[in-house]
Image: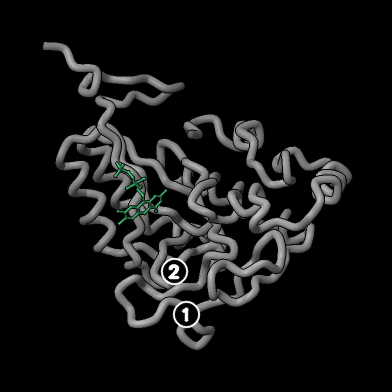
Amino acid sequence: MTSKLFSPLDIRSKHFRNRVWVSPMCQYSADDGVVSDWHRVHLGAFATGGVGMIMVEATGVMPNGRISIGCSGIWSDKHAEAFRPAIEFAHSQGTLIGIQLAHAGRKGSTMKPWDDHELASIAEGGWINFAPSPVAYKDFPIPHAMTVDEIQSAEQAFVDAAVRSERVGFDLIEIHAAHGYLFHQFLSPLSVQRSLKELLSSCESQQQTGWKVHGILMMPSNFAKYSKKLVLI
Ligand SMILES: Cc1cc2nc3c(=O)[nH]c(=O)nc-3n(C[C@H](O)[C@H](O)[C@H](O)COP(=O)(O)O)c2cc1C
């Protein structure tokens, strides 16, 4: 009997052997953003199961873009290289592997879910959260409202992370624009108090092509400039 679920799928140059894809799942087990044996075993186990694609957890493009102090990051080449063994193992099993690039915005700087308190202080490895406007999430501290330069730095961090992802062998990237994280914050009246005019005019004056709508939506065209091989979803 033929099954669509177990039939292959081609997207651009990528061949997925089936349509069983593993959702990204935060592991809270990185060391200053660097993934470890934990991740290699976690991700590798899915590859041994024969899935078509594994999506790596929400991975911070900047240190202050992580959710928790244990979240993975890809803000340096060292961080990117730490993914390589898991990528190579997935490929050895015929499984493609992607990475979810993320910035948590005002929802960052938490401890790990199993710790006895939620918010990480600076002494515990936490940071000051950046966000579109100084509007706090729940009982979190009021975040720092990003300047236009800081918005553009975040954009560049996503681009740099995409380039690193491709270089280290990832097959695709996913931009995390859900769950109330930074992209989502720019799109919600609950967390953005800036005018569309302010953000768009600042972007256009810099001839930025990356940020659209509230100055923040990443457009595939930006990635097309940098990446010939990655699939963007
Ligand atoms: C332990 C755990 C960690 C998760 N981490 C992420 C994440 O890093 N990024 C994300 O977009 N979703 C994350 N999610 C949500 C899942 O990717 C998925 O969207 C959710 O479980 C719903 O899918 P389902 O209906 O197949 O269970 C996580 C879920 C779990 C259970």
Q: Residue at x 65, y 63 (%)?
A: 131
Rendered view: 81 above or below 2 = below
Question: Residue 16: percent from the left, percent from the top?
Answer: 31, 26
**Residue type beneath disc 2:** Ser
Question: Residue 221: percent from the left, percent from the top?
Answer: 65, 31
- Estimate how packed mark 2 is, as few (under 14), some (14 to 19) or many (20 or more) residues with alpha carbons within 10 Å: many
Asked which colour scheme the image uses, the reply is one colour
Would you say 54 lies left or right of 48 here? Answer: right
* Among numbered discs 1 and 2, the one appearing first in the sequence: 2
Label 2 sits on a secondary structure element that is loop
Which residue, given by chain and number where applicable, does mark 2 sit on? 68
Q: Nearer the viewer, residue 94 or 146?
A: 146
Q: Nearer the viewer, residue 179 or 5?
A: 179
Q: Residue at x 60, y 77 (%)?
A: 141
Question: Residue 92: percent from the left, percent from the top?
Answer: 22, 38
Q: Residue at x 54, y 75 (%)?
A: 139
Question: Residue 112: percent from the left, percent from the top?
Answer: 36, 72
Q: Farthest residue in the left direction?
A: 1
Would you say 162 lies left or right of 117 here? Answer: right
Would you say 55 lies left or right of 147 here? Answer: left
Q: How many marks on residues?
A: 2
Label 1 sits on a secondary structure element that is loop
Q: Quadrant of residue 40?
A: bottom left
Q: Quadrant of residue 72?
A: bottom left
**Residue type beneath disc 1:** Ala
- Estimate how packed mark 1 is, as few (under 14), some (14 to 19) or many (20 or more) residues with alpha carbons within 10 Å: some
- The N terminus sits in image quarter: top left
Asked whether disc 1 touches disc 2, contact meaning CB atoms under 8 Å apart, the reply is: yes
Which residue, given by chain and number where applicable, does mark 1 sit on? 120
Question: Which labelled disc corresponds to residue 136?
Answer: none
